[in-house]
Image (cartoon, rainbow, N blue to C red):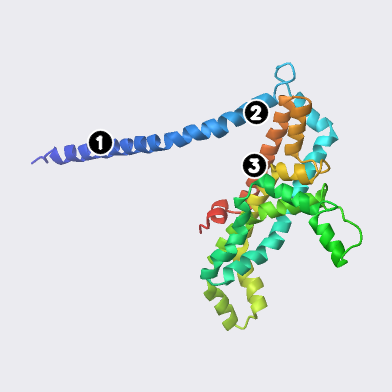
Amino acid sequence: MTSSPAPHREDALNATKLRVAERRQSLMVLALTLPAIIAVCLVIVIPVGWLFSLSFLDSSGDLSLVNYEKMIAYKSYLRVFKTTFNVSFLTTFLCIVIGYPLAYFLSQIPRKYVGLFMLTVLLPFWTSLLVRTYAWLVMLQRNGLINNFAIDLGIWEVPVKLAHNLNGTLIGMVHIMLPFLVLPLYAAMRRIDRHALQAAANLGATPVQAFWQIFVPLSLPGVVAGSLIVFVLCLGFYVTPAVLGGGKVILVSMQITAILEDQFNWGAASALGVVLLVSTFAVLLLASRFLKLDSVMFGRR
């Protein structure tokens, strides 16, 4: 007695329907994401590709590596990149030194008071970057508010040069970048289970030991996330170093602007931009080799 082929036909029909449904769902997802893909191509892929293409053209429009050869031959380019990374590292370090106690304070106070204190962190976002930078210039100049106030109090006798140098640049950049470190760090600290600290205290740990051995290691993902954000943003910063540096602290972004304004050399400027972009990706790649960036950035376990 032979079995009926009807069940086999029904299974094949169901499999076909599943494949059709999966194909339809894939097309629907593609249709929903297509506007975002087009936007990314228009805003990121095409401009970056155009930047890469310009970097391989000489002044006559021919393919050449002359722009990259100049960057190797002239030590001034190396100094600019060294200054850029030094300023970025110092800004990130100062943001950690200032931002960690602030984020810790915000994580320890009752939640009903967090909004009031968080307002002081978010308030700079409501003011134009240019306005904040020139406000610091007014405060830091030789006859500015800080010098006059310090002289009146007897802290120092003659005006100290706080602007148009590295000091002024770091002060302005730390003020602007600090919220980018405090916010992810505060979120990481709020996720720390307070029962772990209580367990450490029950086992005989002092508050200082519990802080350094339990709380600090658990908050490191927030420190890394905020530090990466601050460091990457500092690599391409322009307005604040240009105003508060007074032309004495030259970063890559300022060098690119100078080349375009003085020489109108799109090839050399594009080569600098490409190297800066590759350097930024190298930093992120190096961080991803030692850290799980998805868990660091989004708090995934």
Which numbered dot is residue 52? 2
The residue nearer to you, when weighing 91 against 211, is: 91
Residues under labels 1 and 2: Cα distance?
46 Å
Which image quadrant is residue 242 in? top right
User: Who's the residue at 61% across and 54% down the image?
Assistant: 291
The location of residue 98, given as percent across then percent down, is: 70, 62
Q: Is residue 157 above or below residue 237?
A: below
Q: Is residue 217 above or below residue 123?
A: below
Residue beneath disc 3: 281
The extreme left residue here reads 1
Which numbered dot is residue 16? 1
Left or right side of 110 for 208 = right
Task: Give the mark toward the camera: 1 or 2.
Answer: 2
Q: Earlier in the sequence, mark 1 or mark 3?
A: 1
Amino acid marked by disc 3: Phe
Amino acid marked by disc 2: Phe
The location of residue 83, given as percent across then percent down, is: 79, 44
**Residue 217 shows in this picture:** no
The residue nearer to you, when weighing 103 against 13, is: 103
Q: Earlier in the sequence, mark 3 or mark 2?
A: 2
Amino acid marked by disc 1: Thr
User: Who's the residue at 70% across and 38% down the image?
Assistant: 276
The location of residue 169, given as percent across then percent down, is: 77, 49
